[in-house]
Image (cartoon, grey):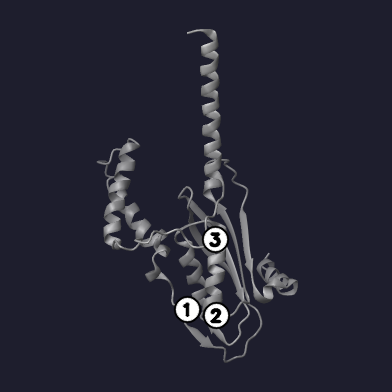
Amino acid sequence: MKQKETLWNTMDNHNNDIDIDRDEEAMDDHVMSSLDTPLRADAFKLSNAEKVEIIKGHFHEIMHTLGLDLTDDSLKGTPLRVAKMYVNEIFSGLHPDNKPVARRFENKYKYHKMLVERDITVYSSCEHHFVPIIGKAHVAYIPNEHVIGLSKLNRIVHYYARRPQVQERMTMQIANELKQALQTENVAVMIEADHLCVMSRGVGDVSSSTITAEYSGLFDQQEYRSEFLSHIRSKH
């Protein structure tokens, strides 16, 4: 092959490598397509049992492709375990049947100050790489005529966390659900989380964390926002 042709081929390969690198960087971009979790119209056509069987088969193929010996006692049950975990546990928030019922109670005590529930465990999954998002959520509201049980605040957070997520979307989904459940705009939500897609792969930064917040109603005012933040930080 002539030297000029060799040079052009080398340049083409180099350009291909650059394109691949750019594609990988693009896949690492933190993109949220909409406020609603992207679901197909037929997302719940299959039963949970049917989904488990299908995912089990696909994950078996993934492990086989990776070269793992699925006859090994330690590995042979993994496809079923993963399938059950996906459907019944870490992605159970996809199914509307699992949405917590936040029953409203009359605000008989006429409590109209701030109520804060902090350090609610967040264990979600990055929808771009399907690896964990681990952190804490802090929520607050100022009631009008109704209140809800304290545990429902935790359950609402857990419901929206248990699905493939983007942290910004999760924050807004929780806030919107609380506003609807409480029939008030006076809601604040903050999430502090570590993303394993940043920590364990890609840039590999183990020291950074992500903070997102959504404020509405009275929390748009500096006075209320500052009080909310002071309650979160007071333990330190």
Residue 168: which quarter of the image?
bottom right
Label 2, on which residue?
Answer: 182
Left/right placement of residue 81 relative to residue 195 reads: left
Residue 164 visible within the image? yes
Amino acid type shown at disc 2: Leu
Closer to the N terminus: mark 1 or mark 2? Answer: 1
Task: Say which residue label 1 marks.
Answer: 102
**Residue at the spot x=50%, y=84% of the render?**
104
Q: Amino acid at mark 3?
A: Arg
Residue at which label 3 appears: 169
Q: CA distance from mark 1 to mark 3?
A: 21 Å
Left or right of residue 232, residue 89 in this image: left
192, 37: nearer the viewer: 37
Q: Nearer the viewer, residue 161 or 30?
A: 30
In three-dimensional space, the C-alpha distance between marks 3 and 2, rounded to whole angstroms, equals 20 Å
Graded by Cα atoms within 10 Å as few (under 14), some (14 to 19) or many (20 or more), the crowding at tag 1 reads many
